[in-house]
Image (cartoon, grey):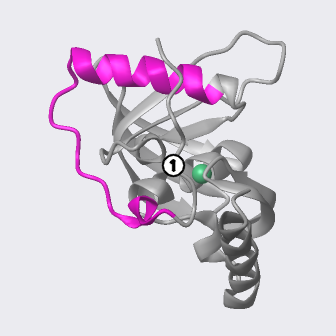
Amino acid sequence: MAILEIVTYPDKFLKQPTKPVENIDGALQEIIDNMGETMYQAPGIGLAAIQVGIDQSMLIYDISPQGEDRYLNVLVNPRIIENEGEVLSENEGCLSVPEYRADVKRFASILVEAYDRHEKPLRFEAHDFLSIVLQHEIDHLNGKLFIDRISPLKRQLYTRRIRKQIKRGE
Ligand code: ZN
């Protein structure tokens, strides 16, 4: 297994919509395992393939509390079928958006369809924190970052700060 490099904002690669996965094959299994290792090491609770330079519709997540048994969930070609309610995701962050957190409005509940890594069709409801995590990751698959969901002014301030840091070579 290998730790993969995480693509960060403002890299334009993160803006492109991903392609549907057509084959859940050995190559994909290897990508999933490497993504898992990368996410746990970061540490993070969710990671979309696009964040490690792979423009395919696939994401992983694990929101089990620290210290408990870990379980790597995989969603291939996930889609949000229905949504309901509203919740404020406080201090949302992202491995691809360094040194920044913001409050984001999210749906409180969603109904998701996807395949797991063994090509089994999944259909399930997600509420509250899991719902937020999945909306964040599925956004990635559509070329969207959480900072695309905050006010233009806040986004501009962050963009300016990060561009200055890049210029200074930090
Ligand atoms: Zn993210």
Q: Position of residue 55 (x, y in %)?
A: 31, 48
Is residue 154 located in the magenta-colored stretch of the structure? no
Residue 13 at least partly seen:
yes
- Residue positioned 49% across, 27% down in the render: 35
Residue 78: quarter of image: top left
Looking at the picture, does residue 118 appear above or below residue 146?
Answer: above
- Residue positioned 61% across, 55% down in the render: 109
Q: Residues within 10 Å of mark 1 (few under 14, many from 20)?
A: some
Q: Position of residue 29 (x, y in %)?
A: 33, 18
Span highlighted in magenta in the image: 11-39
Q: Position of residue 167 (x, y in %)?
A: 66, 69
Is residue 18 located in the magenta-colored stretch of the structure? yes
Looking at the picture, does residue 90 appear above or below residue 131?
Answer: below
Predominant SS of the magenta segment: helix
Q: Which residue is mark 1?
A: 7
Image-based side of 154 in relation to 167, left or right:
right
